[in-house]
Image (cartoon, grey):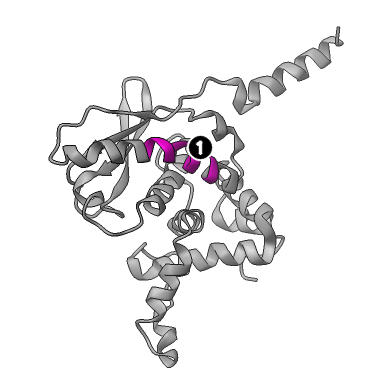
Amino acid sequence: MFPRRHQTLVFLLFALSPCAWARYPAALVKDYSGRHQDEFATQFDRVRLLVNQAQLEASSRLGLMQYREGFQYPMIIRFEDGAPTGIENMVAYVRLEQSNAGFMQELVVNMDASTTNPIDFDRVFYHEMTHAVLNDAIGGEASAKVPAWVQEGLAQYISGEGPDRVKEFAQTVKKFQAQSLLSDLDGPPTARAYPQFYLAIQYLYDKHSVNAVQALVRNLILGKSIIDAVEDSTGLSWVK
């Protein structure tokens, strides 16, 4: 037997470990009565295969390995026709909910858009799954602790869409007009700002390694300010 103090330490380590708590696998809802019955079966199977892949990819890139075992809050995936106005992606989006049991979220696939839009569905799904993992890690809307540029930069990096966004926007201006593409990282997450959000995260990966990015994510989840989180994860001052 361990001495009592060692028994206490082992208990605390186990209790604080993410794996010590029950976790929820993402639940796919097969109840769909919309306009796209012919396409639904195919899309359902596609999403069923993507769920674990996207969750594992997002969790490993973010350094949140506990998500190999599922979510700490309920996560439901639904298929619906249509989407609210003003959302980031019409093809799929994350919807936050509060129930009697507490926080939960839904990843909604918009069948209207996903069956007619030529955009790469897998990339959109990975993008939204990154948001879902961050929301779950915080226990609510990630924007409460994670700035928009970090969230959207990470989502583009993990989904693989970042380089294409940069190329697409670069082609809209001549070389001497490149300055017009610059956006304030702390500004609103407009479509024009997304390439810069991605490039900021890519810069952290290239110059400071994946460890720095994962440390940044963990620090933000713990409640540190973006300035303190960046300085702690890179060893550089915020100004530098």
Identity of the residue drawn at 43% across and 41% down: 50
Identity of the residue drawn at 18% across and 39% down: 38
Magenta span: predominant SS is helix
Q: Is residue 144 visible?
A: no
Q: Nearer the viewer, residue 107 or 160?
A: 160
The quarter holding residue 208 reads: bottom right
Identity of the residue drawn at 63% across and 61% down: 205
Compared across the picture, whether 94 is left or right of 229 comes to: left
Amino acid marked by disc 1: Ala
Residue 218 in the magenta stretch? The answer is no
The 10 Å Cα crowd at callout 1, few under 14, some 14 to 19, many 20 or more, is many
Name the outermost residue toward the left: 35
Which of the image's four quarters has the N terminus?
Answer: top right
Q: Which residues are magenta?
A: 47-57
Q: Nearer the viewer, residue 145 or 165?
A: 165
- Residue 15 is situated, as x and y percent measured from the top left of the image, at 65, 20
Q: With respect to residue 120, does 16 lie above or below?
A: above
- Residue 106 is situated, as x and y percent measured from the top left of the image, at 33, 35
Which residue lies under the disc numbered 1? 137
Identity of the residue drawn at 16% across and 41% down: 36
